[in-house]
Every structure is written in C-alpha cells, then in structure tokens.
Amino acid sequence: MKILVGFFLLVLLFPGCNNASRNKYRAEDSLAYYPPAPQKMELAEFRNYYRLLSSFFDTTLLNKGFNGGILIAKNGEVIYEKYAGKIDLRKKDSLSNTTPLHIASTSKTFTAIAILRLVQEKKISLDDTLQKFFPGLPYAGITVQMLLSHRSGLPNYLYFMSNNKWGLLSNGKWNRQFATNQDVLKMLFEKKPDRVSSPGSRFTYCNTNYTLLALIIEKISGNPFPEYMRTKFFEPLQMKNTYVFTLKDTLTATPSFTNNGIYWGYDFLDATYGDKNIYTTPRDLLIWDQALYTDQVIRRSLLDSAFAPYSFEKASVHNYGFGWRLQLLPNGKKIVYHFGKWHGSNAAFTRLLDEKTTIIILGNRFNRAIYDAAHLCYDIFGDYQQQKVTDPDETDSIKYLLLKPASRKQRKK
C-alpha cells in the first residue's frame, strides 16, 4: 500500500516539477538575446579586406598617436580589430578589448532607442509634449519627437550652465561640484534661458534634448537611467563592459587625455547623462549594432523611423534621425552613424546598411584623425564618396572651455 501511495505521489509531483522547470527555463530564456548568426566570409574575401584595412589604418590613424580600439565587421563577422596604447597614459597598463571607453555623443544612439522602446510599449508617444512629464515647464510646443531629432529649439545646457550672468561660476567653478540632469531641468524652470528657435522650425544640435529624454525614461520607468539601461539593454544583450557613468565611477572609469598626453580631469558637467556618459568597448558596440538587425530590441518600423531624416531647411547630404546622424548621398547611398567627443575621448560608430558593415573607432587621447579615418574607411566597402572631415560633427566639449584640462603638474601625479 505504501508503495502504491508513493507511486501516485511521484506521478502527481513529477509533472509539477517538470512544469516548474520549464517555466523557470522560459523565464530565464525570455531575458536571453539571440544575435543573428554571422555569415561566414570566404577566406580570399576576408584576407582581401584584412589587407586593405590593415594598410589603411596603418597610414591614416595608427601612425598618428592613436590610443584606443578599432573594430570593423561585416555581416557580424569581425574582419579587422586592433588595440593600441594605454588605459592611462601615466601608467603602463595596456588598453585591451575589455577596456570601456567614453563614447560621448554616440551615447545618444542608446537613449533614442530606449525612448522608442517605451513608444513600442505604449508608455509614451512621440507626440507627447514636455508638459506631460514636467508640468509647468516654460517651453510650450516641444514634443518627444522634437527632442529626438534636435528640433526643440531649446538652449544647450553646456552653454547656459556655464553662463556667468546667473552667477553660476566663480573663478571658473560652478557653485556646486557637479551638475546633474535634475539641475539642468531646474535651470530651465527657474532661469528660463532663451530659446534658440521656435519648436520644430529648424535643426539645432543640442545636448539638453537628450538630458531631458533620460529624465523622461526615469519618470516613466521609475528607475534611474543608469539602472534602466543596465537591466533593459546591457545585461540582456550581454554587453559586459558597458555602463552609464555616475559619480561613483570617478576613480575607476578610463581617463581621457589631450592630444599631447595631458590628463583631462573631471569638471562640473561630467555627471549628466543621456546625451553622453556611456562607457563601452568596440566589441560591446558590435553587439549593439547586431541587436538592431533583429526585432528583439525594437520592431523594424520604429527602427526605420530612427534612421529617417527630419530636417530639410537647408539642402545638404547631412541630416539627423532619432539619435542617429545621416548622410544621404546623391547616388542613393545612406550612411547611418554617430560620432562623439567629450574631453579627450573620441568615438566613431557607423552602420553601412547596404553592406551590413560596422565601423567602430574609440579613443581616449584626443585625436581628430579618428573622424577622418572613419569617414574614409567607408569607401573600402562601397561608393560612399567620402572626403576628409572639416567639421567632426560633434561639439560636445566645446566653446564653454572656461574649464581647462588638468595641468601638467596634475599629469605627473
């Protein structure tokens, strides 16, 4: 009798255990990301690209004091990868494929996709105005879409936070050590700096737009932006060397340097995010790139909207989507990219969609040749009609240079 009872209990319990196991597997599996399988390249084609790229970067970048990482991939397969220099120029620690580097405005690609994910989840709309999230904000008529496409007309906080007329700076320093996204919002409420244009009237690249988008993500998700990005994107995508910088990272984050090797210390604008402050590696950026070829991050129609142009006031091959710069060439070619500059950090991230080619160059010693090399590299893969860059597109660390990089004395510490 005891044997029969035991048998029936086993029959009853086993399916339950099996279901629990399956449910656990499904729960874990739902967090998994499956990248598209790289398309294996023929050996002769691979060697040809490798020779071309090696010769190209040897003569355009690696012989020009480059300190950072380069990764070129086609159909998800890495065809060229190179790391040069030091993590910290004051030490002997070699930079590697796991060294996170500050990608500056290239961070906007992440913020924009995070916003579009909330649109997909029907938590916000592109037509929502700022007043929905920040009631009473004295800038009417600005929508989420205008923030994404830099058509809000808002003033750039990199300028108005540095403006002496409000007594914010004393001897080159703000009245507090670091300004936050909330401080930017507070300034907009209290000081009401002048618009640069009316909403939707023209394109004006403005970092304020993306600090506000990060605040919208925080308001809707209920989580700090760095935590939201970590749990929603970085961890599921297994971007193990990627994070949003916060003040707790000041002692461990990879430092940056001027072009002549002087350490560039932190200043009061180093605590804002959304517009900048993602640290990552070329390999992790390739994961991000490949994720966008699937529907697992956002659906295709929304991604296409990010890669569409929205500004036509001036005839130009240059345009801007949602968090992505565009070149729309006369021959029909389209370049989707974003460069970045913050202090001594440079970033170039380009997706050549026709060839499914990814170009990533990151550096932590300021080097304008990074932008030239990125642009000129496109023509190895197609007719992209590139020339040397006269304007590197990014003006992140910019004209507010009331704040100087650390002195040579600090460099020796």
Image: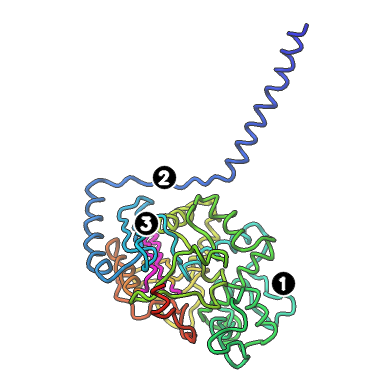
Query: Is 323 part of what is drawn in magenta?
Result: no
Foreground label between 1 and 3 = 3
| Circle 2 residue | 37
The part of the chain drawn in magenta is 341-366
Q: Residue at x 66, y 29 (%)?
A: 19
Q: CA distance from mark 3 to mark 2?
A: 25 Å
* Whether residue 334 is visible: no
Q: Secondary structure at mark 2?
A: loop
Image side of residue 172 versus residue 64, left or right: right
Q: Quadrant of the C terminus?
A: bottom left
Q: Position of residue 292 (x, y in %)?
A: 48, 56
Q: Secondary structure at mark 3?
A: loop
Q: CA distance from mark 1 to mark 2?
A: 42 Å
Q: Between 197 and 213, which is closer to the camera in this rendering?
A: 213
Q: CA distance from mark 1 to mark 3?
A: 44 Å
Image side of residue 141 versus residue 301, left or right: right
